[in-house]
Image (cartoon, rainbow, N blue to C red):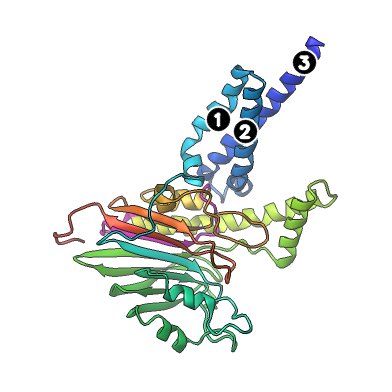
Amino acid sequence: MRHLGRFVIGVIAAVNLLCAGMLLASAYSPYVQPAEHPLLSCLGLVFPVFLLLNGVFLLFWVLARLYRHALLPVVAFLLCFPQIRTYAPLNFGSDEVPEGGLKVLSYNIMGFGILAKGEPENPVLAYLKESGADILCLQEYATGRTSRHPSQKEVDKALADYPYHHIGAVGKNKANRIACYSKLPILSARPLEYASASNGTWVYELAWGKDTLLLINNHLESNKLTREDKVVYEDMLTDPEGAKVKSGARLLAGKLAEASAIRAPQADAIAREVSRSPHRCIVVCGDFNDSPISYAHRVIGEELEDAFTEAGCGLGISYNQNKFYFRIDHILSSPALEACHCRVDRGIKASDHYPIAASFVRRFPTDGDGG
């Protein structure tokens, strides 16, 4: 009987070892080049799964008083602590924008959503109007598509507190647009060139007192999952033992890997833009279509700090459809800026994304010439 007990403990330890290995593999998958190993680069998507499993193993070892075995998940947690903090930080603070601070809001508005029947005002437009942000970075910007969408004139009227704005087409087919509405003067605006059919990036320079703020608004390559693909994913979650799980997983993994490989050079282009900028105040935000544990997030954030990691709390899930529970909308900033608060607002569901907002103050005296 004792031998049987040892065998069972050994099997559980072996499974724990496998899960610990997968946790570390997923945590460090952002260092894999997606163009060379597209499937491996997507391992970051399962990071929370193996984080949870190792937490269960830790609890089991503690309750069983097998403390030596508990070292296995503990060591795994320590080796990927930076990734854990990036994925699910614990910061608590006020929503108030500090005096002299700057509030930036990024929101994939899905063409301003669709005005529900009986609603007098578009909910997305009303939300933006009352947001209190100094800068609005909007992705999937579209007006006047139907009578249930606001016209450009209606948007400009509602956002009259933002005297400066720029709307630019992205992608080869120019069918998609992103926009910046700002209370700060927009000094320049230009697209960042990289390959994409319908996604893209715009780079702005804004006057912020005596400083120039470099703002990069992004809508990186979409995963191009069809409605049918998302149904397959939901079926896999509700019936993981189903016969179609293997084929469904292969289909989804292939599409996610393909999109990851396309996003890689886009992320590289944004990172180069940040690296060669002469400005000390830099904010990079938008819909990355990738999690915090990804090549795109790592490369873009190499010289930046993630505002949610520094000042957010929890998972910050920003996509609200089809059980894809990930934070794919991000706000990053240069070390010269301190994130005082960052949160994903789950109170509005007019789009398939939630808005993310962050407040910043400068870490340097503001009476100089800036630059």
Q: Amino acid at mark 1?
A: Ala
Residue at mark 3 to residue at mark 1: CA–CA distance: 25 Å
> Mark 3 packing: few (<14 Cα in 10 Å), some, or many (20+)?
few
Q: Residue at x 60, y 43 (%)?
A: 48
Q: Is residue 261 left or right of residue 2?
A: left
**Disc 2 to disc 1: CB gap under 8 Å:** yes
Q: Which residue is mark 3?
A: 5
Q: Please identify, in this view, whether the residue under mark 3 or under mark 1 is nearer the observer.
A: 3
Which quadrant, please, contains the N terminus? top right
User: Can you tell which quarter of the image residue 332 is in?
Assistant: bottom left
Q: Quadrant of residue 331?
A: bottom left
Q: Position of residue 97 (x, y in %)?
A: 33, 61
Q: What's the CA distance linking mark 2 and mark 1?
A: 8 Å
Q: Which residues are magenta?
A: 275-293
Q: Nearer the viewer, residue 52 or 34?
A: 52
Numbered badge on residue 54: 2
Residue farthest toward the top in the current orientation of the protein: 2
Instruction: Answer left or right for 309 relative to 253.
Output: left
The kind of residue on which mark 2 rests is Asn
Q: Is 208 in the magenta? A: no
Q: Which mark is residue 364?
A: none
Which mark is nearer the camera, 2 or 1?
Answer: 2
Residue that numbered label 1 is attached to = 76
Toward the right, the furthest residue is 243
Q: How far separated are the C-alphas under marks 2 and 3?
A: 21 Å
x, y percent for residue 224: 64, 64
Within 10 angstroms of label 2, few (less than 14), some, or many (20 or more) residues? many
Q: Nearer the viewer, residue 188 or 101?
A: 101
Task: Write the residue at 30% across / 68% down.
Answer: 205
User: For the C terminus, which image quadrant?
Assistant: bottom left
Q: Residues within 10 Å of mark 1 (few under 14, many from 20)?
A: some
Q: Residue at x 82, y 52 (%)?
A: 244
